[in-house]
Amino acid sequence: MERKIWIGIGVLAAVLLICFFIFLYRPAPTREQLLKKFEEFEGKSREMKERGYNVTEAEKFAKQAHEFFEKKNYKRAEDLLNKAFEVLEEILIGIKKEAKERLSYVKVSCLYNRVTDGAPINRTLDDVIRILKETKTNFIYEGWVRYLPCPENCSMLSLRMREECEMRGYSYEHLRRAVSRIKEEMPDIIFCGGVLVEFLNHRCWNPITNEIFKRDETWNMALDPSKWGIDMSKEEFQTYYAKSQGWTEGKENYNPKEQMPFYFPDITNSEYQKLLMSWIKKQIDCGVDAIWIDMLFSQARILAKITGDEKHPAVQASYNASSKIIDEVHAYGYSKGKYIYVGTWWNFVKLPYPPPDVDFVAVSVSNEEILNKRINETRWNEIITEIRNKMPDVPIFVRFDYGYENSPLATFSQNLSKEEQREFLKIVDKFCEEKDLVFIYPIHGGGMGKNPRKLSYNKFNWYDSLAPEFQTYETIKELASNKTIVTKMEDRRGKWK
């Protein structure tokens, strides 16, 4: 026994000695490496300073590092520069903590997709702001969603397309102006943009670099299960997905590359990752505080279904790639000196992997609950338990899903009368209050399925709570007014970031 103890001590001593020599004789960084690192620090500290953060301590370490750099003591300069970065990192940790606390105070969230599309119904941005104020909204969910290639401004387009662009309010210039105007009136509000991972336009562009991608290039980004040895070609999978969307009806000899309106992209494809991140970064540059990434983990779940193996390499690679997107969004927010919230659907918790660093998740009310006008508490208890087992503190948002045939929003809008819709909103709201969930009130936006009988203003296939066909706005306003809302928390600068 004593011999084993001495052997253990000897091994530990050897390991410590090796670590000491590695640290002591680590190669000094080159002058060029340090210059690049100084440049990185200056950019990061400048952005944080411009946003009001006190980076004095970090700058002190950086100044000392520069003094040793001038003396050509590159090791010591690197050590001090690392300390400067550590101070900035501590500030970022504080930003995240404050941001998480801010999100925990959200009581009223509303779906308003998009805040810029009011022209067809003569609703101005000032009208939208009035609605947000009347409902005491502190989280605008899907206030703007990128679903088709979006121009920087409408003047870039042809005359015909320019008029449609202005009518729909669909340009980054529209988004930038809208967020700025809303924040002027409601500085504490959280504005959530959005992207749709599952739809890759066969012709699109990167709004950061303006690089254009044509059909051959986007087809190369489309998911091909066979690359992991799965017995399903790219054409077979894309056709399979097209059928699930109802895109193949009445079409023989379907050619997915030529006929699909959108491809299902491969989240592990590095080119698609860059493209997806460009759509997200552009919205962040326009001022959004949060991003809803629709169907972010859908590839992992679909491949798990196809293979019948949740631990298949294709599933794990897809899950990890999706998690990486969340980390990259946070990193980009930090590079801008702010915290960007990321939300997606809840069902990634069903897969046997560590949870991603997601900030909020959403769960949809089911069609059965809507038709029965009753919440299935057993279903919800199971879902909440699954989420809480992996993410005890993550905020859970509740919504009506939409965007496909027979979606919950389609069922809600088409199968319930005005009175029944109002009553069901009360039922869901009461349940959410009891379970500490955040109900996303359906104020505006969201498709109501294929060929709906009831249209907003007898014309538009999107839900609007003020439309005469639905008239649920006053109920939403009443429910929202009953919430105890914290409208402002003081941070180190005296206001929310």
Image: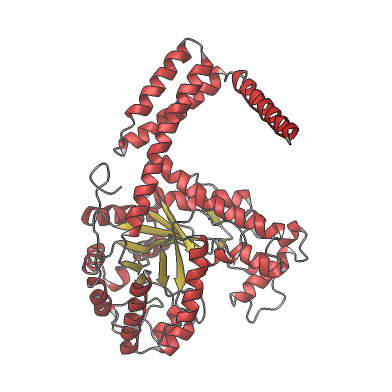
Image location of residue 9, percent across then percent down = 68, 30
**Residue at 36% across, 23% down:** 60
490 or 272: nearer the viewer: 490
In this picture, is 464 found above or below 137? Answer: below
Image location of residue 449, percent across then percent down = 47, 80
Image location of residue 298, percent across then percent down = 58, 65
**Residue at 58% across, 75% down:** 245
Give the tally of numbered discs: 0
Image location of residue 148, percent across then percent down = 48, 62
In this picture, is 417 found above or below 116? Answer: below
Q: Which image quadrant is residue 51 in?
A: top left
In which quadrant will I find the N terminus?
Answer: top right
Q: Which image quadrant is residue 471 in?
A: bottom left
277 or 99: nearer the viewer: 99
323 or 271: nearer the viewer: 323
**Residue at 67% across, 64% down:** 310
Whether residue 449 is visible here, answered yes or no, is no
Whether residue 130 is visible here, answered yes or no, is yes
Pick out the residue farthest to the top: 71
